[in-house]
Amino acid sequence: MSSSSNLRTADPAAPAEQRAAWRGQPAKPGDHELPSPLRRSCLLGLLAAPFAALASEDPTSRLQRWGSGEFRRFGFLVYEATLWAADDPLRPPLALQLTYRRQIAGAAIAEASVDEIRNLGLADETRLQQWGTQMNRLFPDVRPGDRIVGDYLPRTARFFFNGRLLGSVDDPAFARAFFAIWLDPRTSAPGLRSALLRRPGAA
């Protein structure tokens, strides 16, 4: 009587080469499997691809270019601004690109934004403090040539830095107040506002 302990069965979880060896057959080319670490890397790469595409999204691609102009402080060029919008440049969706020409700390950008919103009277101090904290977390230090794009959607404002998504502030009141810095008739830079709102094709 043969002992059942001498019988070997192929484990379904074993590698293809080992299962074939147990059967006394050579492994087929299609039976080869990637090592586990490499297989995981490939799967993670495929899963991450849609998110990488989202992170590098260009918010200006769905809009038409309107006007552009310069912002100067004490005679020094700080940044160049360009507006993209649909039919109405004062309503979302729209996007504003700032191309910086000077080195500025992200905290200084956030602080200046809070000061401008305060001067427009669009929020109380409690809300301004909250928005300032959020912008401090979002805005990076910039160097000449760096670009920040603000994407104004109906209920949120998203921010991109050199084509990469920084994050968003999901507060309609913040979105309105932030873009009012440039687009409100009471802006501190009326010349830049006029240049941004110039209709495409206008002389």
Image: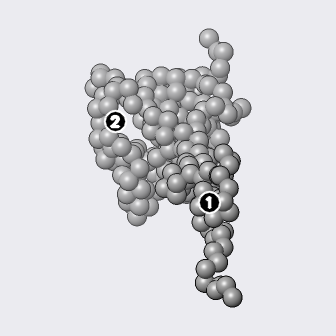
> Where 44 sits versus 192, above or below?
below
> Where 23 sits versus 48, above or below?
below
| Extreme residue toward the front, this view | 1
Tell me the residue that label 1 is attached to: 21
Query: Are discs 1 and 2 less than 8 Å apart at CB?
Result: no
Left or right of 98? Residue 52 is right
Q: Secondary structure at mark 1?
A: helix
Foreground residue among 46 and 101: 46
Write the residue at 60% across / 84% down.
5
Mark sitting on residue 142: 2
Q: CA distance from mark 1 to mark 2?
A: 61 Å
> Where 73 sits versus 28, above or below?
above
Task: For the N terminus, give its image quadrant.
Answer: bottom right
Foreground residue among 92 and 160: 160
Write the residue at 62% across / 25% down.
65
| Extreme residue toward the right, this view | 87
Asked whether the viewer can see residue 196, the reply is yes
Q: Quadrant of residue 201?
A: top right
Q: Secondary structure at mark 2?
A: loop
Write the residue at 63% across / 64% down.
22
Query: How are the colours assigned in the image?
Result: one colour
